[in-house]
Image (cartoon, rainbow, N blue to C red):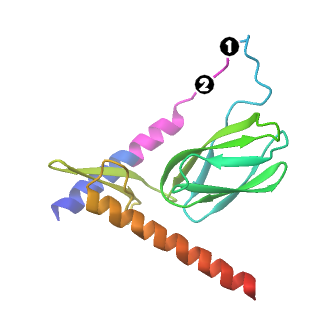
Amino acid sequence: MRLRTVLLAAVSFVCATATLEAKTPVKPHRAPPKHRIAHPPARGVAISMDEVRVVTFTQPIATVFVGNPMIADATVIDSHHAFVLGKSFGVTNLIALSAQSQTVANQQISVANRSGGVVTLNKGANQFNYSCTLAHCEASAVPGDQKTFFDDANSAIGAHQDQSVKAAGVASAR
């Protein structure tokens, strides 16, 4: 019962903090004038787990890379578009390169649940991270969490991804 009380208090704090941060204006990073960049400043992609967004690029791209493929994945559709799939909770980045290996875009990808925040629970020396909504919390392990908790959470993510790939294979075979 005490754990539920602590988690509910933490969720309330995270939601209140997220609301305050959302109202705080953020100034975009500007490169010094001597280093002109041919593409616009980086924009972020916010996505929910198991959802896909289409990202549009202002210049032709040849390939895309995702910083942490456990959090998101990207697939090139054509020279100006790519699909971004939210795979597990967290933040990573996407870099798109032209055919000449020039950076066309470097965007942050945030994968979260639809309404909630991240709660870190410390039990002695052990750390446990959860992604929470107002109704419940799910394991959202990060490096530094207790080893068994981290391994179990990442194993569940891998099994979820395998099921998605198998389901997509069955659907495409029809």
Vertical relation: 99 (above or below) 78: above
How far apart marks 2 and 1 lie (CA) works out to 15 Å
Residue in front for this viewpoint, 99 or 8: 99
Q: Amino acid at mark 2?
A: Lys
Residue 136 visible: no
Which residue is found at the position 75% from the left and 30% from the top? 40
Q: Secondary structure at mark 2?
A: loop
Asked if the stretch drawn in magenta spans residue 155, the answer is: no
Q: Secondary structure at mark 1?
A: loop
Which residue is found at the position 31% from the left and 47% from the top? 144
Q: Amino acid at mark 1?
A: Pro
Which quadrant of the view contains residue 61? top right
Point out the image quarter for the C terminus: bottom right
Query: In the image, is 5 to the left or to the right of 36?
Result: left
What segment carries the magenta color?
15-32
Residue 32 visible: yes
Labels 2 and 1: the sequence-earlier one: 2
Residue highlighted by disc 1: 32
Which residue is found at the position 45% from the left and 43% from the top? 18
Asked if the stretch drawn in magenta spans residue 23, the answer is: yes
Which residue is found at the position 20% from the left and 60% from the top? 3
Query: In the image, is 7 to the left or to the right of 49?
Result: left
Instruction: Give the label on residue 27, or none.
Output: 2
